[in-house]
Image: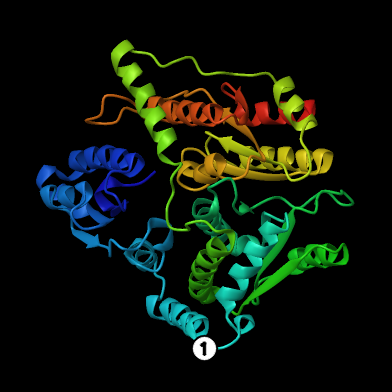
């Protein structure tokens, strides 16, 4: 539990209209006002946004401690080395000078004259684009746990930048290692190991050795320490732009994100009008099994979990992913909703038609009202899940939806056993 009177809240939204941070702000503002009073509450909030957005205006009206106004020419997923990434990093004690010095060294190498093979970002981007053209579009990231969250950032960068016009990179982040002896990986894979020198790399090094021996293409990116992540931020942004060029797509737009948002708005409007949402679809496990049995080379399972991120659920999802990998030899991705809507959501709708989409939902045993909004967090989450599923179905996507009731981890285990 947090103490609202002793907490600084960072509200971050490039457009200043993003539903999730604005509803969280409404909730926590109410708690802070109750603890400190209306006049003093603003000092507990900072904003990170573009100039002249609704959030920038709200920061003035509500007397925020500070508003960090970012360069509006920087796209959201490319903004990690701007205020959007640096302000939160500074608050957690990151040495920004050291992080940015690492990024600047990579920038110098990427912008220097010379052969493409000497350009770390150009080489990586050209390799990624070429691999996709050769059918190896499942870029699978391997690392130790200490830097695994970096893979989720790469996932958004690649998926939202390249997943359009029926092509794109399908990033596979945080996929559990296969069971010993299992034959899990097809010829649609390309592996990238992020190798932190001062970490225990025995497990990922062993997996990489097996992959190389099996003939899979593997790139190994060496990091001397955690601050080399600054260089990797720059390298991967540069590489994504190059990969987009190789694939002939625009890496700086996201044309298919709005559809799910529009359908979510429609669901919420029905809730306001009728006091209820459309009934959510809930299949049985046989529907998913049928889709997986019909899967072929190059397909993948996208798990879209509108569930809490707990140890039990994470373990259950990893077991499900291993079962699918070993039995059907297809890649698996996993995202928590609604977060993934801002990440792989574009890829799911605009990318190649190789996805099988499994949506997992649960009962809301305790719902929370959103002050000043006429729906709760539970209603919002359900509307986002239903809106996204409708958008996928409208595009002819292969979908399965399972409502797991009050025991989602147990429900996932039963699903795994059934497969």
Q: Nearer the viewer, residue 298 or 321?
A: 298
The furthest residue to the top:
274
Tell me what residue is drawn at x 63 percent, y 60 percent: 145
Q: Position of residue 255 (x, y in %)?
A: 43, 45
Mark 1, residue position: 113
Tell me what residue is drawn at x 73 percent, y 58 percent: 134
Apparent side of residue 203 relative to residue 385 in the rendered image (left or right):
right
The furthest residue to the bottom:
113
- Residue 174 visible in the current orientation: yes
Q: Quadrant of the C terminus?
A: top right
Tell me what residue is drawn at x 42 percent, y 26 percent: 383
Q: Quadrant of residue 143?
A: bottom right
Q: Position of residue 251 (x, y in %)?
A: 48, 58
The furthest residue to the right:
181
Q: Position of residue 228 (x, y in %)?
A: 53, 76
Q: Quadrant of residue 199?
A: bottom right
Q: Quadrant of the N terminus?
A: top left
Q: Is residue 121 above or below residue 398?
A: below
Q: Nearer the viewer, residue 361 or 28?
A: 361
The furthest residue to the front:
248
Apparent side of residue 52 relative to residue 164 in the rendered image (left or right):
left
- Residue 225 visible in the current orientation: no
Q: Position of residue 416 (x, y in %)?
A: 75, 31
Apparent side of residue 76 relative to residue 110 in the rendered image (left or right):
left
Q: Is residue 115 above or below residue 210?
A: below
Determine crowd level at label 1: few under 14, some 14-19, many 20+ residues with C-alpha closer than 10 A.
few
């Amino acid at each position: 539990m947090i103490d609202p009177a002793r907490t600084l809240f960072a509200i971050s939204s490039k457009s200043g209209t993003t539903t999730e941070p604005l509803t969280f702000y409404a909730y926590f503002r109410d708690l802070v006002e109750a603890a400190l009073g209306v006049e003093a509450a603003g000092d507990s909030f900072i904003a990170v946004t573009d100039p002249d957005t609704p959030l920038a205006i709200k920061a003035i009206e509500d007397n925020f401690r500070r508003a960090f106004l970012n360069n509006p020419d920087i796209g959201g997923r490319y903004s990690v080395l701007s205020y959007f990434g640096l302000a939160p990093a500074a608050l957690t004690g990151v040495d920004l000078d050291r992080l940015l010095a690492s990024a600047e060294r990579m920038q110098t190498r990427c912008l220097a004259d010379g052969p493409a093979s000497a350009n770390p970002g150009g080489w990586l981007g050209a390799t990624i684009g070429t691999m996709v053209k050769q059918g190896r579009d499942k870029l699978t990231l391997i690392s130790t746990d200490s830097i695994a969250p970096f893979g989720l950032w790469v996932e958004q960068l690649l998926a939202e930048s390249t997943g359009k016009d029926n092509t794109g990179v399908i990033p596979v982040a945080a996929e559990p290692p296969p069971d010993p002896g299992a034959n899990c990986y097809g010829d649609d894979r390309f592996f990238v190991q992020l190798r932190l020198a001062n970490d225990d790399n025995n497990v990922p090094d062993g997996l990489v050795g097996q992959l190389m021996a099996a003939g899979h293409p593997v790139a190994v990116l060496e990091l001397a320490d955690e601050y080399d992540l600054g260089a990797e931020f720059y390298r991967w942004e540069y590489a994504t732009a190059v990969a987009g060029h190789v694939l002939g797509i625009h890496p700086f737009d996201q044309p298919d994100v709005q559809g799910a948002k529009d359908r979510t708005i429609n669901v919420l409007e029905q809730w306001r009008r009728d006091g209820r949402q459309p009934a959510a679809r809930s299949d049985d496990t046989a529907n998913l099994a049928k889709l997986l049995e019909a899967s072929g080379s190059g397909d993948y399972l996208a798990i879209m979990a509108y569930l809490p991120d707990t140890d039990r659920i994470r373990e259950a999802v990893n077991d499900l992913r291993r079962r699918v990998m070993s039995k059907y030899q297809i890649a698996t991705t996993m995202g928590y909703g609604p977060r993934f809507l801002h990440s792989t959501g574009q890829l799911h709708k605009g990318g190649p038609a190789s996805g099988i989409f499994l949506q997992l939902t649960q009962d809301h045993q305790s719902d929370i009202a959103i002050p000043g909004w006429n729906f709760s967090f539970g209603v919002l989450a359900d509307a986002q899940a239903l809106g996204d599923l409708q958008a996928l179905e409208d595009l002819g996507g292969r979908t399965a939806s399972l409502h797991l009731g009050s025991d989602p981890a147990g429900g996932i285990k039963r699903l795994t056993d059934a497969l």
